[in-house]
Image (cartoon, rainbow, N blue to C red):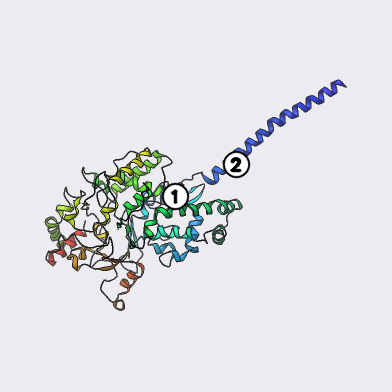
């Protein structure tokens, strides 16, 4: 009997020990499963498809630079916002009303990236602002040019759209999920994640941007209009989080092709020569898109290196219409006598004092030495080394290189002159009002159709009427919109002006 009791006690002891081992093992397994599920649903990264990663043209247009991690918007929220809030866009047509470059058959516009980081997210890359689309007539589909100026993009309207959606009380889980359920069938778990996590977090983060975008809501500032970007104020309010001031300096979005031309010692970049080199500009622009320090500096700088190599080799497209070779040859002589001293010499890409060029001064006032010092400290704090922003006062603008100048309308640093023919007119004879951001090319005046300035509405051609409908009105009397200055070449005989413009088509 004692033996039987001892055996029973021993069995109980063994069961107890097994239980003591089993419970922690189960807990560990559950924690591990939960951690894996959390990683899988929120943090795992899947590579983009090969058609993006392995094609340089597509990689520039749709390739991720890592912005999805911190600045990305959950795909299905991004998808339904234009459906929920069409009145917050500048016109009908959803995102297309923002003037984005959008290829037929693509689910997102050029420059909008989609990548799975736990769940599919949408962010931006450099191509959003640096892709040109143009049509040779209103009856054709557009051609898209990588690294060109985004002259149709209404960037400020895009910024406002996201913030305005978040501020609307209709941006809540019930309403957003109702719209999402109309277009896709999420799994039960994904629907719960969207309802209780992604929708409220997305709204919160968009609302946090309102303070940084406060200056784009000021009633005393005119709209930037299509194709313009107040770049240094964006840097000031986002990178160094400076308090809002009264500066306002939207400028034409530039082309970024053929960056190897800036490799010459002594050249600087951006309109006011406020950055030392191409690498610094790409780093700062990419950091602005990331909205945070890179997850991996090596990965980030690898993307920067690829972009710099791609953009250094990328050449502007050739003029798509016939060129009068004889007239262009005569125009080359006019160019060398009147233009090359600033635009094809050791002065190119080096700051010219404002008094010499005479154009609108507002851009210079948006940035200063202290801003540059603060921004350089932020980037070095990320452990990233670059030449950086110029820590000196700005007092003028860089005479730009003119490669691909035919596709870079409108002209002057603030985009205040619609065509090359208009640029060669005395400043007081240039259009006082025109429409920016239409994509049909005006081969007669060499630029884009600008709404036929000075023509009554009832007398407009269909193309000019359409330019006024989709474009944004530019009034040179408004702040940062002046078309004065750069009077070089305006006194030439008309025959020499015609020859010069013909030659400029070939650059």
Secondary structure type for disc 2: helix
Between 456 and 380, which is closer to the camera in this rendering?
380
- Assess disc 1: are there few (<14), some (14-19) or many (≥20) residues with their C-alpha within 10 Å of its C-alpha: many
Q: Which mark is residue 163?
A: none
Q: Are marks 1 and 2 in contact (CB under 8 Å)?
A: no
Disc 1 element: helix
Residue 236: x and y, percent? 34, 49
Q: Position of residue 171 (x, y in %)?
A: 52, 59
- Seen from the viewer's position, the closer of residues 98 and 324 is 98
The answer to whether residue 381 is seen in the rendering is yes
**Farthest top residue in view:** 2
Q: Can the viewer see residue 256?
A: no
Quadrant showing the N terminus:
top right
Label 1: which residue? 71
**Quadrant of the rendered image containing residue 142:** bottom left
Q: Is 10 located above or below residue 278 in the figure?
A: above
Quarter of image, res 473: bottom left
In which quadrant will I find the C terminus? bottom left
- Residue situated furthest right in the rendering: 1
Q: Nearer the viewer, mark 1 or mark 2?
A: 1
Badge 1 or badge 2: first in the primary sequence = 2
| Residue lying at the far bottom of the rendered structure | 458
> Distance between the Cα atoms at labels 1 and 2?
26 Å
- At x 39%, y 49%, the residue is 289
Nearest the eye: 451 or 369: 369
For residue 98, which quarter of the picture? Answer: bottom left
Residue 240: x %, y % from top left = 36, 46
Residue hosting label 2:
34
Residue 293 horizontal side relative to residue 266, left or right:
right
Counting from the top left corner in percent of width and height, residue 457 is at 31, 76
């Amino acid at each position: 009997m004692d033996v039987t009791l001892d055996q029973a006690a021993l069995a109980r002891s063994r069961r107890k020990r097994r239980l003591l081992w089993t419970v922690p093992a189960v807990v560990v397994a559950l924690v591990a499963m939960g951690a894996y599920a959390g990683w899988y649903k929120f943090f795992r990264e899947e590579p983009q498809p090969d058609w993006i990663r392995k094609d340089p043209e597509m990689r520039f247009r749709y390739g991720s630079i890592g912005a999805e991690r911190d600045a990305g918007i959950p795909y299905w929220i991004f998808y339904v916002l234009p459906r929920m809030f069409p009145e917050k866009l500048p016109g009908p047509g959803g995102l297309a009303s923002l003037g984005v470059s959008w290829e037929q058959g693509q689910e997102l516009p050029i420059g909008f990236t989609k990548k799975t980081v736990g769940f599919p997210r949408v962010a931006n890359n450099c191509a959003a602002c640096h892709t040109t689309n143009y049509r040779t007539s209103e009856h054709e589909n557009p051609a898209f040019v990588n690294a060109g100026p985004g002259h149709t993009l209404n960037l400020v309207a895009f910024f406002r759209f996201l913030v305005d959606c978040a501020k609307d009380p209709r941006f809540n889980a019930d309403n957003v999920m109702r719209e999402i359920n109309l277009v896709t069938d999420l799994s039960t778990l994904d629907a719960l994640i969207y309802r209780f996590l992604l929708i409220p977090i997305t709204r919160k983060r968009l609302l946090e941007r309102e303070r940084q975008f406060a200056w784009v809501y000021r009633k005393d500032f005119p709209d930037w209009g299509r194709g313009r970007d107040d770049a240094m104020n964006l840097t000031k309010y986002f990178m160094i989080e400076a308090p809002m001031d009264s500066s306002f300096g939207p400028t034409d979005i530039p082309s970024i092709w053929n960056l190897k031309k800036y490799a010459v010692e002594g050249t600087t970049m951006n309109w006011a020569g406020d950055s030392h080199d191409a690498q610094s500009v790409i780093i700062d622009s990419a950091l602005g898109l990331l909205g945070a320090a890179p997850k991996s500096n090596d990965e980030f700088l690898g993307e920067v290196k690829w972009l710099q190599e791609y953009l250094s080799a990328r050449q502007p497209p050739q003029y798509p219409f016939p060129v009068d070779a004889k007239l262009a040859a005569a125009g080359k002589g006019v160019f060398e006598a009147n233009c090359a001293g600033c635009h094809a010499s050791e002065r190119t890409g080096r700051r010219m004092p404002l008094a010499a060029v005479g154009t609108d001064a507002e851009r210079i006032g948006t940035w200063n030495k202290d801003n540059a010092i603060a921004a350089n400290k932020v980037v070095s704090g990320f452990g990233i080394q670059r030449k950086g922003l110029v820590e000196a006062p700005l007092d003028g603008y860089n005479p730009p290189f003119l490669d691909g100048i035919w596709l870079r309308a409108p002209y002057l640093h603030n985009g205040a002159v619609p065509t090359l023919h208009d640029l060669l007119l005395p400043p007081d004879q240039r259009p006082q009002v025109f429409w920016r951001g239409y994509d049909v090319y005006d081969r007669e005046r060499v630029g884009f159709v600008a709404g036929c300035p000075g023509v009554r509405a009832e007398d407009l051609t269909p193309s000019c009427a359409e330019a006024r409908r989709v474009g944004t009105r530019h009034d040179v009397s408004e702040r940062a919109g002046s078309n004065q200055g750069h009077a070089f070449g305006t006194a030439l005989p008309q025959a020499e002006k015609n020859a010069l413009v013909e030659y400029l088509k070939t650059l």
